[in-house]
Image (tube, rainbow, N blue to C red):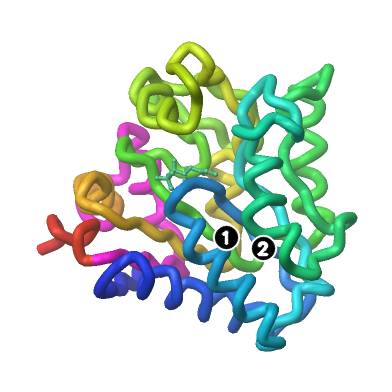
Amino acid sequence: MRVLIEKDYTEMSKKAALMVAGQVLLQPATVLGLATGSTTLGLYQELIGMYRRGEVDFANVTTFNLDEYYSLGPDHPQSYHYFMYENLFNHINVKAERIHLPSGTAADIKAACAAYERKITEAGGIDLQVLGVGVNGHIGFNEPNPSLPVYTDLVDLTEETIQVNSRFFRSVEEVPRQAVTMGIGTILKARRIILLANGRHKAEAIRKTVSGMVTSACPSSFLQTHPDVTIILDQEAAALLG
Ligand code: F6R
């Protein structure tokens, strides 16, 4: 694992954008795995800026998002579909047919999960996966649990995640209790992974991610088993690293 510690959120986002853009420059038909959330907003703003300045071209890029709330349709303002179009896809030249997000509303959700997993394989697998991390160490919505899904699946959210994510909803009751997420195996199959984290509230999760035992009590710790992971932090998120 490589760990890069940047001065602040802006520098973390710029470093991550350089890596994503570098990947696309080297391999224009790259398959990107993408995350939503506050952490990745700065990265997406940087990528939009680079696209507008003509520094990177997404015309041949394929994307697969990590997760989606179960039962939220693409038009729901808190759905991850909505987030991605608002904050990235509407502002760059990625082709609509190359954008993939798990469905939160498919009639047969299990079949839709299996189909999503197949699509990733058919696209040749993920070249570069972007991750954030939950305060409880979740990646995607792989929550701390005795067992973790290997492939894309429907999972229950923990009470902690429901509380943390309620900041985006009018009330905690509105937060969905389940989500569709790429499994831990889907994530670990990506050829390269970058994980971003900022803020003191992520410091403990980061400590457990980079050192100590691999445990399903902290799903991000499984990244230690991957050969090409770069962790990009601001100083606060790095506060508990020795
Ligand atoms: C979202 C995702 C989650 C977030 C994590 C951190 O697609 O996969 O694992 O990365 O919950 O969220 P923020 O960035 O809002 O702190």
Q: Nearer the viewer, residue 180 or 41?
A: 41
Q: Position of residue 160 (x, y in %)?
A: 34, 24
For ligand 1, tell me if the residue under mark 1 lies within 8 Å: no
Where 65 sits versus 52, above or below? Answer: above
Q: Position of residue 106 (x, y in %)?
A: 81, 24
The dot on residue 129 is 1
Query: Residue flagged by tag 2: what amino acid is it?
Result: Leu
> Which residue does the numbered mark 2 point to in the structure image?
32
Which residue sits at x=36%, y=30%?
A: 164
Q: Is residue 211 magenta?
A: yes
What is the quadrant of residue 214 in the picture?
top left
Which numbered tag is attached to residue 242?
A: none
Quadrant, the N terminus:
bottom left
**Circle 1 SS class:** strand
In the displayed structure, would residue 97 be above or below residue 58? above
Q: Nearer the viewer, residue 136 or 46?
A: 46
Taking the spot 41% from the left edge, 31% from the top edge, the residue there is 167
Image position of 122 (left or right of 196): right
For disc 1, the neighbor class at 10 Å (few under 14, some 14 to 19, many from 20) is many
Residue most extreme to the right: 97
Please provide the residue range marked out in magenta. Answer: 210-234
Q: Residue at x 83, y 74 (%)?
A: 59
CB within 8 Å, label 2 to label 1: yes
